[in-house]
Each structure stands twice: as C-alpha cells, then as structure tokens.
Amino acid sequence: MLSSFRVSWRNLTRYKKRFLFTLIAIILGVVVMTAMLIAKQTTSSTLERYEKMYMGDTDFWIQSNNRVFQQKELDWLFTRDEVKKENAILLKRGIAEIDGMNPAQTSVRFTGVSTFDNGLFELPVKEGDISEEGLIITENAAKLWKKGIGDTVTFKNMGSMDVTAIVYEGSMLSSPRTKEQASVSSSQVMVPLDILQEWTGAKGQITSYRFVTNDGSKKDELLAAYQAELALSDLFVQPVVMDDRQNNDVEGLYYTFDIIAILSIFISGFIAFNMIYAGIIERRKEFAVMKSLGYTTKGIYRLVLQEIGLLSLIGTVVGLPLGIWFGDFFQEMLMSAIASQDITYDMELAAPLTISATVGLLFPFLAAAIPVYRAGKTPVLEAMVDRTVSRQGGKRASIIRIIAGIICTGIGLIDNAWAFLLLFVGLVLLYPLFMRAILRIINPLFQITFRFAGKQAVRSVSLFENRNANTSAMLAIGVSLAMFMSAALESLPDGMEDEVRSTFGGDIHVMKETPWQDDDLDVIQGIEGTANVYRFADIPNVTWQTKAGEDREFSIMSYSGDPDKAAFFRISDEAKEVAGFPQLYLGERALAEWGGEVGDHITLNTPAGKTDFYVKGSVQTSHYTSYVAFVEESILGEVLNWSHLFHVAIVTNGKASIPFIYSKLSENYGEELSSISSLSQRVEQSTNALTGMNELMQGLLLLVIALSAIGVSNTLFMNTLERIKEIGTMRAIGFTKRQVKFMIIAEGLIIGVTGVVVGVVYGILATYLNAQSDQAQALLSFTVPWVSLFLAVAGGILFTMVAAWLPSITASRVPVKEAISYE
C-alpha cells in the first residue's frame, strides 16, 4: 500500500507547477467556501443568540393597551399552579446628570426589573455582577459617561445609584456610541423595579409581566385560558416567540454567501478537472502498458482515485485552518459594516468545517468522474500505437450543448431568483460560440500587436477550444458577479432611500408614554415649522403561525383613509373581493414568510385574543423591513382592543425646522417622550450598512476573479505541456524565446479578454434584469458601476497576464533537442 501511494504521489507531482497551481486553487476554493459558511452561520447564530438573551426562558408575557397597569391586576395569575418563575418590568424615561454633556445628550430609558437573575432574560456581562441589584449600564454608556464599576450616576429629579455591572450592547440594553448619536437616541439602563417605581411615583405599576410555566406542552391550552381570563380587560397575553425578522433582513446576505461559496468551490473543482483530464490523456499509453501487464480496470481506477484523494486531502487540510482565519477576519469586517454598535459573537465552526471538509474532500472526485472513467476504459491497442483519440460525436455534442445553452438562457430571463442562476449555466454552455466570435474580432489586432506569435496564439486557443472556453467562462462568471453585486449595492441605497421617503409617513415620529390627546395635537400643530400632525397605532408583539405551523410575530400599524393614498405603504397586490372579516394589508416579507396568498385568511393573537383577518393585499413599506401588517384605524378599538394611540407623525415645512420642533417637543413633554425618530435618521440607518458592504463585496469578488486567473495559468501550463514537440519544432525553424513568451502571453490575453468582455456584458444584462424584476424594482435601478467595471476589467486582464507569465517562461526555456524528441 505504501508503494502504491508513492506511485500516486509521483504521478501527481510529475509536473510540479501544474500540481502546485491546482493545489492552490483547491486550497483557495476551500478557504473561501469555509469563510462564507462561517460568516453565514456565525451571523445567524449571533442574531439568534441576542434574541434568545432578550427572551430568555419566558413562555408568556402580559401587557396592557394602556402601556402600564397595576401589578395587582394579575392576582388571579399568582394563584395558578403552573406559574414557575416570573419577572415584572417597568419602562420609564429620565435624564442622567453627566459632566460635560447637556440634558439632550443624556436621555435615559430605564428598565426596572423585579429580579435580575432568574433566567427570564440574559445580559452579556463585560464587568461586574448582574445579580447584585444596582445600576447596570452598557459598554457604550460607560465610555460616553466615563463611568466604571462602583461609580455613582445621578438622575435628574430622581436619585443616585452605583454602577454594579457593565454589559455589552444587546437586544435588552443598548446605548448610543457618540454624543451626536446620544442627541437623538437614549441610553438604556437597568435598575431594580421597586426603586424605579419610587423614583417615578409609579407605585405598583408595571409595563409587562413575563413568566414561565411548568408544562410547555400545554402552551396552546394555557394561552386560550389566559386570553379568556383577560377578555374583558385592558390587558392581553402573548406567547413569547423568537422572531427577529422585523429588525434584520439578512436572507439576501445569506444567499450571496451561498453563491460565492458555490462559485469558489466550483471554479477550484473545474481547475482540478482540467489537471486530471490532461493527466489521463497524457498517460493513455502508460495505462495501456499497465493493462497489458495484468492491471485490471479497477486497479487503474484505484490508482487514479488515490491521486485525487491525495490532492483533495492536502488541499482541504491546508485550506480549513486558513478558512477559519479568513472567516474570522471577514466576520469582523462584516459586523463593522452592517452593525451600528459593537456586537460580541462566537465563531460558529462545527457545521461550516464539517460541510467544507466534506465538499473539499469529495468535490474533486466528482469533478474527476469523467476523466477517471476514461482512464479505466483506455483501449490497449489504440493507446500502444498512440492513435489519436476519436472525435466522433463531437459535432453532435456541440450542437446539443448550444441548444441546452439557449434553453438555459431563455429560462434565465424569467423573473425568478433560481431561474436567474440558469442564465450563468447558459453562459458556460454557449461560451465556445462567444469565444469564436471574439477570436474573429480580435484576430487582426493580435496579429498586428504580436505579429506571427499572435497568429499562432489564436490558432492554439482554437486547438484547445473547449478547455480554454471553460476556463475563460469561469473568469467571465467571476467578472459578471462582481459587476452585478456592485451595481446592486450601489443602487440599493438610493432605492432604499426612495422607499423610506415615500413610506415613512411624515418627517418625524414621536412616541409618548401616555396616549396623545386632541389638545396635544393642537400644541404640536402650533409649533413653528409644523405643516401637519396625525396619530397612528403601532401594536407590538402580535403573534401568528405560518402555513407550516411555525410561530412568528410582527407589529400591526394603523392607517386612515384611502389605502391607495396611505402614508406608510404602497400597495403592490390587492384582492378585488370583499370578505366579511376585518381586513389587513401584509408587508411583502410578512406575506412571503406566512406562506399564504392575497385573498386568504390569517389568524392573529391580538390584544383582543385570537382574531381572523382577510388579507386584502400585500404592500411595500420601509417599516420593520416590510415584516409588518397594516389595518384601518377605525377597527383598532372594536376589533383589536387598542383604543389608545401613543404615536404621532409630524409633517414639517422643511428639514431646517426639525431641530426646533425637537426642542419644543422636549420642552413641552420632556420625560413623557418614549422615542423620537426622523425621516433623515431612518434613511441614514437604512443606507449606512450597504455603503460598508460595497467595498467588502468588491474585495471578495476580486478574490474569486484571482481564483479564476489561477485556472487560466493552469490551463496554459497544460496547453504548453501538450505542445512541447510543436514548440520545439517552432524553435528549431527560427522562433525565438521572446516570440514563444509572447505567444503564450497572447493566449492568456485572449482567454482573459474574452472572459472580461463576456463577463461585463452578462454583468450588465444581469443588472438590467434584476432592476426590471417585480421583486426588486422598487429598490433597484439600472446603473452601471463604473468603479467596479474598471476594477473587474483591470483585475481580470492583470490577473490573466500574471497568470500567463509563468507558463510563458516555462515554454521559452524548453531545450529544443528535448522538445523535438518529447513523447
């Protein structure tokens, strides 16, 4: 067995440069795939962990449509045996007195809890002890206020408290990072409930009540019992559901990671295929001799598979640790690009490494299936006399390939995400046609530039047409994806800004701890710079089930008047029928997650209990990443048991008036205000992450183009080795070393230029099709990313020239005498 592996190793490394480049390609493929899978898994688990920390082990929570209620209203619940653990929570506003900061920058949202450490929520501790009742602040607040463990913080008109713990930013507590951010958002802190009630004069009052039950299997029965108990009150109960889709729309990001991972391993597998296929052709006579000496077909299969196994094993073993390092680096860059605050995360390695190792080890075998089969079926007599491999059926196969390419391209033009991928399958199948057409165009130019060497280069590329076309196709796909992703990331901020501006509803949204009254609207309307003001509802934590039976939750917002003129959404699809149920409109993401269709009925757990709604239509909206529902204001009280409105939207006379309106709102309502947000802030939040992602994706896709260039180099090495005798003959009749170099470099340029041209055309086509798609038309506009176009063209040609340089050196250094006698 040892000698058998030695033979496999010797065969594998016979052509060291070709082996080295193939190994590098496999390593890079494993590295990129591992990094993308790590980024996807880590991002997903981090978001899930933060949601889990906020929800803890809670089964249910009880809230009020008045925002606050007396805890004694839950005396009936305390008598029930199934309640295992509970936590009462009160939310209030306040102002911290911090040296060097004005009151507008020290706004605080208090979370008062009855117990700090019973598993109903979890805080990511940085310093201190969260079980010690005191003041808990976040890392950002500690830096901004310059406070540490044991320091005292004083709150205006309330009292003072020592800091007992500092926690990382999370779902439960988060704070602004800078003074500028603190001017428009509050720092969130946690204190004991009884102290907060005393400070705010809210004796016995709470905002919500969380609890855990003994028997989770009877959750539906318990929910029905609690809903019946609260049916005639202002209180309502909801099951706790882990669903963060309102705050994070990352499905598209995961899809991108998957595409890049698949593309990288596919390109590396293709490079391995080229090497193994060329090796099989070169060793036909060797296989024939082995068969004549008694080797069976299975014996040859085993020998070749050992070579592939060694190649994949080395590539995977080297690639995995490099992938972990690159994944860690990429994850850090990703989090800094998409997150507005520092996020702690743990790298998720188990699943990504398992998948990467499995694919890294097995994919080269899959790529080499056809060459290995041909090795075992080598005819002894044909190979011994070195008869040329039969080309019969090649024309027929070419016709089938073209027809299949046209069909795939046609399907790829359909407005569907998965059909869109077939556009690139069509590119690969039709690529020989593209290469022939471009060769005819550039042939005169290359003959003028490289003279006879250019003419020979065109002939050589045509000689190995399929191999060169497939190699160039990989480069074209890398270039087209780079163009497409960059165009999407460039146009998305503008598209998202347009959507936010058209569906935000006014210029300022204000939430107050008590309901807005008519007198309050008159006060706001009287503020200089206010054009209009109106109330709306935003009902949180409404739970429901998908068609597959999975628990989900979103918010319900209200609108008034004609839905076609609603300020918060634009109707994208609407049923003509009118049902007897209350009607609602679902955001497009909510509709897709639910799994139903416009015109169906959906059951929601609302403040009024289980309620059936008729899905009148789907809408495009910037609110809650389109994971939201909208109802007409007139049904809030009767159908939803939500009679108070805590939100107002303010339309201003111009952006310049917003700071003045902010100051007057703070002056008139002060600590009653729960939150204030403006249209410009929402636009900035929506577009900032995409701006950082653009550079990140450009760098990543340039890496894919570099991987494709390695394939070009490997292909040129194989072309050169198969033409050693030809090159020797050319040298013997007067070809100089320089001409040989120019010829090989010209071949590489032909492959590179073709890949870049086709890639740019397909990239623009993909961008146009995506901009015209019904799924993305509201967010994406057709644009040519000129910077990315330059990077793709320059990178593709530069990488190709560098890739062609080494094979040209090798070809020019072949001794004439050895080349002529080469077998």
Image (cartoon, rainbow, N blue to C red):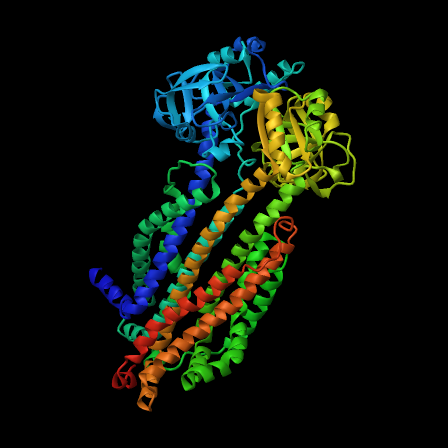
| 40 shown above or below 698 | above
Q: Quadrant of residue 221?
A: top right
| 281 shown above or below 273 | below
Where's the C terminus, which quadrant? bottom left
Residue at image location 41% in from the left, 69% down from the top: 800
Residue 537 seen in render? yes
Image location (x, y in percent) of residue 649: 67, 31
Where's the N terminus, which quadrant? bottom left
Left or right: 556 as drawn, with respect to 265: right
| 526 shown above or below 597 | above
Left or right: 454 as drawn, with respect to 561: left
Residue that lies at the very extreme toward the bottom in this rendered image: 733
Image location (x, y in percent) of residue 711: 40, 66
- Front residue of this view, candidates 130 and 243: 130
Left or right: 571 as drawn, with respect to 93: right
Image location (x, y in percent) of residue 779: 62, 48
Residue at image location 45% in from the left, 66% down from the top: 794
